[in-house]
């Protein structure tokens, strides 16, 4: 068949699928409107349908059953609305481009090929006719595996052998066919090259239609407990793990919710950078935070050093050793070793240390200490509740009530029934109402105690830390000390809180210290890990080599798989060659995709004034559709350069990890805040010999250069770094 006729057939098929999508969209919108209306009227009628009848035990019971039924109905209505919302989103995404690939597959003992179209989501009509297959479905694996001829794919019922007759990539926009290519095993496929030549964007994009074979293996891995990916800059580590999260959410859709996936990102800016990838695949973002944020949530108000100080802050003591010391210490700890602190409100002792000790000592010794402390915590909450009840009967509170301002009174009054409210559903007399308000007032007064119980303020964890590692907590704490403290906290009191997390994904794993990785491996002991990074981009004072990462996670019978990614999809051919040169040439194993581009400019400049002029010209010559960055070694340098250039208009200075805005076009920023990001044009600030000489500085230089997609500038004053010549 000629390409022309093929084209007509494909165009006709596309038009048909698009039409089906339009029909389905109409249907889903109608259903969604009906479902919204159903929920509205359900809620409106709810108070009339359900009236608590407490006249007798049987009546109350009947009423409760009715309430339960209504709850279930409401849950179903909500579920339906959510489902329709997801359908709407999927259809919207598909309408932008219904599919990107077609597989022609011959099954054994059949004579005619079956055709499967692959898209960002699946699509079938009400008769279950499947028009588009989700890229995560088993059959779609054939597209990414890219083996024509006899092959197979893994379906739920087992391995299915097939003959893959053709693999077609299609470029479609809405209902219009733009192009198609029949590809075999060519690595540098036309669609990929087209995508890679595009300009950079403010946010990372999904790579669904051009995922490469080696990336696909990572995305679909379900066998490993720990998957370690060591990949050069731009090899798609971040993109791949995001696609992997989408894959896992699809694969385990009945048992995995996005909040059970924890994605630890290198800096706050990064979270913004990647936030659109999963929604573009119709999935919700997982729990996302930096490791520092994670420590903050467990640091009990202790202050942690800023990201910047991690660049230089070497600690003398080996932190992993401290973690083991903490384990030994807690292992040998006896209930009699514990120091309790009475919980007081002013001079009033609400729960005494003596009571805590006695309650703990009454518990069986065989039960692990952290469980006993957890139980004690529950007992303390109960003790507080009965304390509040007794307290609220005292007449003094009536006086306090009278002294409340109108505003405070109304606030208490409007908060709805409190926990002690037993008269829900029937008219209350004035006395009951006053009792209820007093209860709330007292409850509120003692809320600090409730919080103190919850956060274990009654246990002096700071001094246990001192006893365990032989040194006090610093202010601010280094990230490693925060880790040690969090580990102590975990071992002593906080073990139950981490079991919900099923997948932990770590980007830039080389920047984590051994103690931090050890902490994650232990605390999320039941989770599956995906750890990605690049040893050459190790720019913080504390980091871990990949062999150590593997060793740290290999314990506890975990199945560890290590994979390498050696091709940069980000940078043009000449920039990739330059990166390869920085990494030691052929020995590095780096493979270059030779797509054309401008050679990196390595330029000698004689003095500071001419250098600043050079930068000004560079900034002025940035094209409208390009994003350009000047990368400095640290934040102070970024600030200084910004001043030296007279705060150039249209250029955003980013020097503070808490104030990040990537929406502009040109930037001056330190390298560590640009981690994970990419720009059309990168200028490395003064790549001279004295500034880039050590291994650490080589890593900085490599990290900076590898942010560039299309153009790289390396100006230097007087003498160039020996790495670049
Ligand atoms: N298979 C692919 N198809 C199209 N683009 C790709 C593919 N893989 C990666 N890319 C693109 O390459 C660029 C780099 O990807 P990504 O940021 O995921 O790499 P990385 O390995 O995490 O880089 P770094 O270590 O430098 O942060 C992105 O623009 C991404 O869209």
Image (cartoon, rainbow, N blue to C red):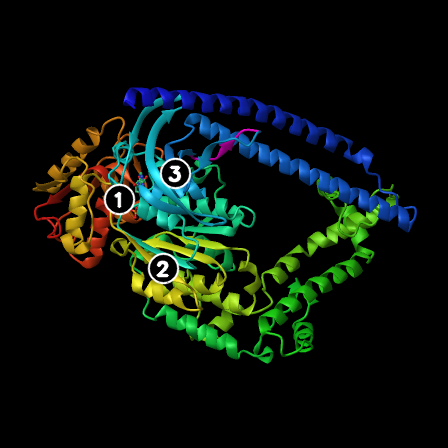
Residue at disc 3, secondary structure: strand
In the picture shown, does residue 116 fall above or below 501?
above
**Residue on which the image places disc 3:** 106
Dot 3, crowdedness within 10 Å: few (<14), some or many (≥20)? many
* Left or right: residue 287 compared with residue 551: right
Q: Closer to the observer: label 2 or label 1?
A: 2
Is label 2's Cβ within 8 Å of ligand 1?
no
Type of secondary structure dominating the magenta stretch: loop
Image quadrant containing the N terminus: top left
Magenta stretch in the rendered image: 119-126
Towards the viewer: 216 or 364: 216
Q: Closer to the observer: label 3 or label 2?
A: 3
Q: Closer to the observer: label 3 or label 1?
A: 3
* Left or right: residue 544 compared with residue 42: left
Residue at 39%, 64% (x, y): give it: 553
Dot 1, crowdedness within 10 Å: few (<14), some or many (≥20)? many
Residue at disc 2, secondary structure: strand
Dot 2, crowdedness within 10 Å: few (<14), some or many (≥20)? some
Q: Earlier in the sequence, mark 3 or mark 2?
A: 3
Location of residue 380 in the rendering, given as x and y in whole percent from the top left corner: 68, 65
3 and 1 marks in contact (CB < 8 Å): no
Q: Earlier in the sequence, mark 2 or mark 1?
A: 2
**Residue on which the image places disc 2:** 561
Ligand 1 falls in which quarter? top left
**Residue on which the image places disc 1:** 638
């Amino acid at each position: 068949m000629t390409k022309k006729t093929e084209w007509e057939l494909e165009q006709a098929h596309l038009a048909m699928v698009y039409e089906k999508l339009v029909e389905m969209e109409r249907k889903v919108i109608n259903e969604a409107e009906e479902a919204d209306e159903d929920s509205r009227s359900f809620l409106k009628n709810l108070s009339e349908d359900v009236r608590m009848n407490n006249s007798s035990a049987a009546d109350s019971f009947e009423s409760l059953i009715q309430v339960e039924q209504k709850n279930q109905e409401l849950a179903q209505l909500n579920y339906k609305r959510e489902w329709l919302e997801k359908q709407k989103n999927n259809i919207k995404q598909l309408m932008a481009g219904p599919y990107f690939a077609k597989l022609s597959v011959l099954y054994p003992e059949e004579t005619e090929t079956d055709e499967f179209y692959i898209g960002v989501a699946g699509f079938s009509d009400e008769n279950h006719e499947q028009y588009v297959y989700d890229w995560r479905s088993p059959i779609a694996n054939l597209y990414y595996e890219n083996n024509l001829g006899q092959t197979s794919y893994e379906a739920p019922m087992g391995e299915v052998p097939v003959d893959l007759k053709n693999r077609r990539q299609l470029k479609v926009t809405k209902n219009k066919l733009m192009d198609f290519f029949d590809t075999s095993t060519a690595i540098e496929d036309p669609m990929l090259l087209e995508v890679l030549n595009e300009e950079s964007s403010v946010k990372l994009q999904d790579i669904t239609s051009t995922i490469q074979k080696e990336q696909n293996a990572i995305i679909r891995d379900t066998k490993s407990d720990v998957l370690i990916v060591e990949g050069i800059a731009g090899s798609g580590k971040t993109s791949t793990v995001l696609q992997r999260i989408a894959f896992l959410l699809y694969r385990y859709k009945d048992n995995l919710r996005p909040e059970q996936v924890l994605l630890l990102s290198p800096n706050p800016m990064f979270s913004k950078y990647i936030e659109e990838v999963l929604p573009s695949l119709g999935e919700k973002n997982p729990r996302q935070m930096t490791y520092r944020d994670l420590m903050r949530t467990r640091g009990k108000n202790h202050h942690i050093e800023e990201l910047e100080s991690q660049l230089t802050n070497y600690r003398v003591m080996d932190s992993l050793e401290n973690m083991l010391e903490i384990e030994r210490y807690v292992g040998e700890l006896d209930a009699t070793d514990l120091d309790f602190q009475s919980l007081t409100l002013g001079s009033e002792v609400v729960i005494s240390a003596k009571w805590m000790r006695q309650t703990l000592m009454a518990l069986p010794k065989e039960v692990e200490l952290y469980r006993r402390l957890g139980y004690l915590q529950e007992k303390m909450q109960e003790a507080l509740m009965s304390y509040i009840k007794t307290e609220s009967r005292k007449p003094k509170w009536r006086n306090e009530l009278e002294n409340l301002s109108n505003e405070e009174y109304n606030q208490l009054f409007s908060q709805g029934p409190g926990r002690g409210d037993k008269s829900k559903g029937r008219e209350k007399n004035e006395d009951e109402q006053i009792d209820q308000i007093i209860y709330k007032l007292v409850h509120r007064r003692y809320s600090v105690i409730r919080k103190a119980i919850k956060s274990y303020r009654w246990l002096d964890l700071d001094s246990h830390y001192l006893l365990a590692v032989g040194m006090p907590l610093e202010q601010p704490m280094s990230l490693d000390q925060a880790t040690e403290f969090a580990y102590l906290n975990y071992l002593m009191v906080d073990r139950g809180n981490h079991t919900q997390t099923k997948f932990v994904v770590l980007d830039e794993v080389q920047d984590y210290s051994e103690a931090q990785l050890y902490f994650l491996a232990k605390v999320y002991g039941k989770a599956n890990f995906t750890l990605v990074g690049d040893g050459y981009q190790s720019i913080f004072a504390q980091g871990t080599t990949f062999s150590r990462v593997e060793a740290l996670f290999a314990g506890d019978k975990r199945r560890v798989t290590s994979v390498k990614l050696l091709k940069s999809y980000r940078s043009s051919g000449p920039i990739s060659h330059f990166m390869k040169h920085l990494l030691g040439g052929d020995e590095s194993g780096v493979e270059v995709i030779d797509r054309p581009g401008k050679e990196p400019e390595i330029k000698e400049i004689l003095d500071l004034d001419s250098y600043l002029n050079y930068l000004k010209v560079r900034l002025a010559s940035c094209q409208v559709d390009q994003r350009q960055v000047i990368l400095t070694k640290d934040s102070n340098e970024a600030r200084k350069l910004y001043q030296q250039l007279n705060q150039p208009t249209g250029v955003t200075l980013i020097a503070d990890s808490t104030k990040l805005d990537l929406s502009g076009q040109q930037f001056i920023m330190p390298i560590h805040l640009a981690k994970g990001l990419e720009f059309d044009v990168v200028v490395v600030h003064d790549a001279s010999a004295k500034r880039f000489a050590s291994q650490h500085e080589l890593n900085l230089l490599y990290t900076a250069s590898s942010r560039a997609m299309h153009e790289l500038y390396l100006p230097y004053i007087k003498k160039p770094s020996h790495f670049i010549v």
